[in-house]
Amino acid sequence: MIFASDSSILVVFCRRPTLGTGKQRIAAELGQQAALELSELLLATTLEDARAWPDPVVIAPASIEDSDWARDLVPAAHVIPQVDGNLGERLATVDHRIRGAGGRQLLYIGSDAPALKSAQLRAAAAALTNADCVFIPARDGGVTLMGAARPWPELADLPWGTAELGRALKRRCEEAGFTMAALAESFDIDTPRDLADAPRLLRNDARPARVKLLKWIADTEPADQPEISISVVIPVYRDLAALENLLDTLHAMPAPVDEIIVVDGEENDTCRTLCEQHAARYLAAGPCRGEQLRLGADCACGDITWFLHADSAPPADAPELIRQHIEAGYAGGYFQFRFQGGRRWYKQLLERAINLRASAGIPYGDQGLFCRRDAYQAAGGFAATPLFEEVGFVRGLRQQGRFAPVNASIGVSPRRWERDGWLRRSIHNRWLAIAFMLGVAPERLVRRYDATRDTGGG
């Protein structure tokens, strides 16, 4: 077994599907036989790509006893069985053997990431011509592909099988002086939620093994359809106290949401830890609210995407109201505007004015905009701007179907009005809106909006 140094070697780590092993979180809901069938179908999607790979392929079965089985999977492939130990130890051993036979650019994939496409594999291989390692992150915090053009650093002590793996793996490579490339996120199938999301994430995929997988999912799906899923996207910039309150509120709701995505306007370990404590997914972007919202929406998996500012206070029954609104045929909607805190006549007057403006024009992001995922995509999403990012998006949503408020209010923080003065802040906001309509760039206006801006919401 000798490999050419200029070839890109695809290494498939896999386990022979057997009853009672693999996909046990799915087996707990659908049964062991269904878990076995799913494992076989997922392996078939991986082998479909391996057979089409133009360079050498290595199959790495979980046990040396399965070597003959592995040789029949891809006849032209080399077989290198895994050894005992955790995944890091097993991967390091296989990596050492391949490099000892002349291999240099190695791409590792598992057998449960059906969304991987041949173009992504080729892009990963191309990335290794300029970088020491490459990753395709998984939405659960792991990776669906990891590749390297040099031997891996120590991998045995990494948190394999956890949401921290991707971050820890990249940090280990950074510490070892590796240059890195990262491609667009993909997903794997480990849980019933992943299985429910697969038809949407794999739609229009004509590869035969994927078509067969989707048919199996449709035939296996319970007669009672799952509740419409909601992903919450929260942009934040340093305002962690408000974010913690919002995350507590979301988790306390009687009908909870299915996914929470926090998009940080800076790389902040404290924010990341807060998200981990609240089972929220953490992403980092630049301090531009439009870019943060776009990133969060692109990564969201729910049927509905709900956008919340970090300092907002949604009603306890908001998820149920949103689901009912969408089930009634609306493309999207928003909440009535209400200031948090004590009631004052000037607050109520301004609330009525804002709600009237929203019904006739554009409700802004602090009103908890939400929409069907397909409507979001058709509307073009948020503009990648730091201010008025929702204007074009809302106009696009109105073209996708009915778009109206729900019969409930969302609490909006009054701190800007309290800081600047109620009349002054209200006039200033209207001046900004008029200037935007007259063509002044949001990048210029945001400096006037708040020179001391400290939050991704507001």
Image (cartoon, rainbow, N blue to C red):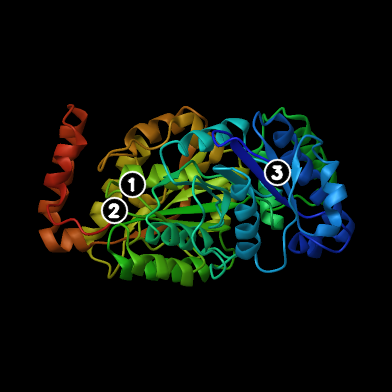
Question: Which of the two residues, 145 or 215, is positioned nearer the viewer here?
Answer: 145
- Res. 355 mark: 1
Q: Is residue 150 visible to the viewer in this orientation of the structure?
A: yes
- Compare marks 2 and 3 and give the one earlier in the sequence: 3
Type of residue at label 1?
Asn
Q: Which residue is drawn at 71% across and 36% down?
A: 50
Q: Do the residues labelled 1 and 2 touch (CB within 8 Å)?
A: yes
- Res. 351 mark: 2
Type of residue at label 2?
Glu
Type of residue at label 3?
Val
Residue matched to label 3: 58
Tell me the quarter of the image containing the C terminus: bottom left
- Report the side of 222 relative to 449 (left or right): right
Calculate the distance from the C-alpha at mark 2 to the C-alpha at mark 3: 64 Å
Calculate the distance from the C-alpha at mark 1 to the C-alpha at mark 3: 61 Å
Q: What element carries label 2?
A: helix
Kindly indicate the quadrant of the structure image that contains residue 408: bottom left
Q: Are marks 1 and 3 in contact (CB under 8 Å)?
A: no
Q: Where residue 85 sits: x, y (%)?
A: 68, 69
- Report the side of 230 relative to 458 (left or right): right
